[in-house]
């Protein structure tokens, strides 16, 4: 057993400069944000002075000054649908709507000098192509410009809301679509639906997921994302994900603690209209085929099975164009059959009658609740304030098919609380993005039933010598762990666009987190028996040949192995000083 508390402080600073040697130059967006830049060519005598990006769904506005050469630059915008309001010396012109994706560095040039006039749009022709400009007198001027992406060498794809809604999946894990990107695999393992994300040939802990710019890195377990070790649960409610970007290489320096795949996700926000949605997915034993053990050696009734997933989401205005809310809930309830059978195809009749009842069909249970909430406030045209919170709770029993009796199952428990406060301030030539986030994650599998664990093996004589075969494990469970992390993160990103043709970016992140790991398996003791110890045809369950237990003992093995066994009863309920006559315990630690 080892229990350690570690305090870690991580800080990173990055400065990026992009020059005007090659045009156009990408204006790098903040993590999880988008950027837009371009040139507006004004008609003679009617100079464009400033441009405002209006988020259509929320009415949130961001204004940028247009330079003498017509250049404008929005270095950080939320992913969403926008239109541009262009302020000229005489009047205002509006572009039609266009969409910016998570992490997209977009360019849009607009030429107001050569655009021919067109009739006012009707209700059937109101939607025009990106890049057109609408005059204040409702006439449409098509410039022929298009949104173009200035990728800067990053390799990856965007998973849009349309893909999330329309592509089939057998769970509600939003990361399942990440394997659309080259070199990325979403791997589902085991009958319980456990899943992990993997990039190339690297392990899952080399992956990092950023949600609203905040890292979800797990510093204790092996899966890379907090709470995702050996669980069929989902890391985040899929209803709350707007879209996300999958980057497999050449990602920028802001993406810390990642060496294979970076997932950059943006959450949904409320809009100026109330909108709600919900879903229910249901499967039971009547909607599946018979399993092999339900067909052989004789046909039996299907074991009860249930897989139900459900959720709701609601968003809307608090104050129109100023403040909005969004909330979502997703639940998962599962009952999955498992089979307990003698190992290596051994005939069940070999097992004593009093142990045969431990074999058969049983049911695993799993419960998950995911809650997410978000409030965004734009008190001025220069400020955006966001508050988000997520709570995740998982419980249930876990037992894999095999020789382990139902009593040895593990009671899984995952609990995760995260919160973030963000303030973005936009000025004429700079943007500052400040975040404070909190995390408290616990992953604590425990034995579902107390008591000692007994493991029965049989020795068989074969041509190449004796071989031990596993038969059955009964008693209490052996998995006893409590691991997690808790702490605060402060990060600040600063972008300067005041030097013509250049964008400078710098950032700092500091993290104070307590890491906790307790692993004390076999806390009640695990006794291993050779059922043929006294007779080749017997089945003795009185004298174990090995005892394993977890106890606070510092470094070293908590295993006792006895080379000589007397024919006498060993009471397996006593832990402590044990040294039977004529036995030589291996002194891995003092007892």
Image (cartoon, helix red, strand yellow):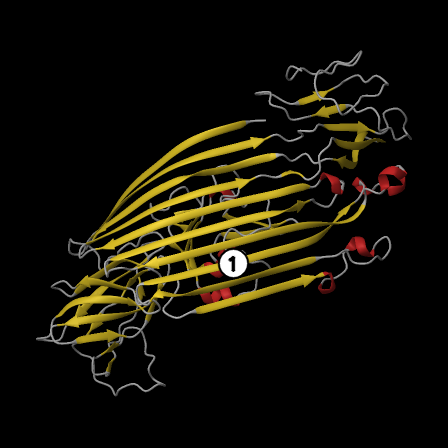
Left or right? Give the position of 212 relative to 407.
left
Which of these two is toward me, 462 or 205?
205
Q: Quadrant location of the N terminus?
A: top right
Q: Is residue 202 visible?
A: no
Residue drawn where x is 34% and y is 84% of the image: 125
- Please, is residue 120 above or below residue 155 in the view? below
Residue drawn where x is 31% and y is 52% of the image: 30
Which of these two is toward me, 21 or 145?
145
Q: Is residue 418 visible?
A: yes
> What kind of element bears circle 1?
strand
- Please, is residue 73 above or below residue 224 in the view? below
- Write down the quadrant of residue 514 in the picture: top left
- Write down the quadrant of residue 404 in the picture: top right
Left or right? Give the position of 130 relative to 330.
left
Q: Quadrant location of the C terminus?
A: top right
Which of these two is toward me, 524 or 526?
524
Q: Which residue is mark 1?
A: 329
Which of these two is toward me, 327 or 467?
327
Residue 413 rendering spot, x and y as whole percentages:
59, 43
**Number of numbered discs visible in the structure rendering:** 1
Residue 406 rendering spot, x and y as whole percentages:
75, 43
From this viewpoint, which residue is outermost toward the left?
Answer: 45
Residue 517 rendering spot, x and y as whole percentages:
53, 32
Residue 77 rendering spot, x and y as whole percentages:
30, 59
Residue drawn where x is 64% and y is 63% of the image: 282
Residue drawn where x is 60% and y is 20% of the image: 553
Left or right? Give the position of 407 relative to 17.
right
């Amino acid at each position: 057993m080892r229990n350690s508390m570690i305090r870690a402080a991580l800080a990173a600073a990055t400065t990026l400069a992009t020059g005007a040697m090659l045009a156009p130059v990408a204006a790098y967006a903040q993590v999880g944000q988008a950027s837009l830049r371009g040139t507006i060519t004004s008609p003679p005598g009617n100079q464009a002075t400033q441009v405002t990006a209006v988020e259509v769904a929320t009415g949130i506005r961001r204004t940028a000054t247009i330079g003498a050469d017509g250049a404008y630059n929005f270095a950080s915008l939320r992913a969403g649908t926008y239109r541009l309001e262009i302020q000229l010396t005489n009047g205002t012109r509006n572009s039609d709507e266009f969409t910016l994706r998570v992490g997209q560095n977009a360019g849009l040039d607009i030429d107001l000098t050569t655009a021919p006039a067109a009739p006012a749009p009707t209700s059937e022709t109101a939607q025009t192509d990106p890049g057109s400009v609408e005059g204040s007198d409702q006439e449409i001027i098509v410039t022929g410009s298009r949104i173009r992406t200035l990728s800067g060498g990053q390799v990856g794809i965007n998973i849009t809301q349309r893909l999330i809604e329309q592509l089939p999946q057998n769970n509600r894990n939003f990361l399942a679509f990440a394997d659309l990107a080259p070199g990325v695999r979403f791997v589902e393992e085991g009958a319980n639906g456990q899943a992990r994300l993997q990039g190339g040939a690297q392990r899952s802990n080399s992956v990092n997921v950023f949600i609203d710019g905040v890292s979800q890195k797990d510093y204790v377990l092996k899966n890379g994302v907090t709470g995702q070790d050996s669980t069929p649960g989902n890391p985040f409610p899929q209803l709350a994900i707007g879209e996300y970007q999958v980057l497999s290489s050449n990602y920028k320096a802001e993406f810390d603690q990642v060496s294979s795949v970076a997932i950059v996700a943006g959450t949904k926000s409320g809009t100026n209209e109330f909108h709600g949605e919900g879903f229910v997915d249901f499967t039971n034993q009547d909607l599946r085929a018979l399993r092999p053990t339900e067909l052989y050696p004789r046909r039996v009734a299907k074991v009860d099975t249930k897989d139900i997933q459900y959720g709701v989401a609601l968003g809307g205005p608090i104050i129109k164009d100023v403040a909005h809310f969004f909330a979502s809930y997703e639940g998962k309830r599962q009952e999955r059959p498992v089979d307990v059978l003698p190992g290596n195809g051994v005939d069940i009749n070999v097992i004593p009658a009093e142990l045969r009842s431990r074999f058969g069909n049983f049911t695993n249970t799993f419960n998950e609740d995911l809650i997410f909430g978000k409030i965004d406030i734009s008190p001025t045209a220069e400020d955006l304030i966001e508050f988000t919170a997520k709570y995740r709770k998982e419980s249930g029993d876990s037992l894999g098919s095999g020789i382990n009796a139902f009593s040895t199952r593990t009671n899984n428990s995952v609990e995760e609380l995260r919160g973030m406060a963000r303030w973005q301030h936009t000025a004429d030539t700079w943007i500052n993005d400040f975040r404070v986030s909190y995390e408290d994650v616990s992953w604590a599998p425990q034995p579902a039933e107390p008591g000692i664990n007994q493991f029965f093996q049989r020795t068989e004589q074969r041509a190449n010598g004796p071989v031990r075969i596993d038969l059955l494990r009964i008693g209490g469970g052996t998995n006893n762990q409590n691991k997690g992390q808790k702490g605060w993160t402060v990060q600040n990103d600063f972008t300067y666009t005041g030097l013509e043709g250049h964008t400078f970016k710098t950032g700092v992140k500091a993290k104070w987190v307590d890491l906790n790991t307790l692993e004390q398996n076999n806390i009640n003791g695990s006794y291993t028996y050779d059922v043929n110890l006294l007779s080749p045809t017997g089945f003795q369950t009185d004298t174990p040949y090995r005892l394993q237990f977890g106890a606070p003992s510092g470094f070293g093995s908590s295993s006792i192995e006895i080379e000589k066994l007397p024919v006498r009863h060993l009471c397996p309920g006593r832990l402590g000083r044990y040294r039977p006559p004529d036995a030589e315990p291996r002194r891995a630690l003092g007892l």
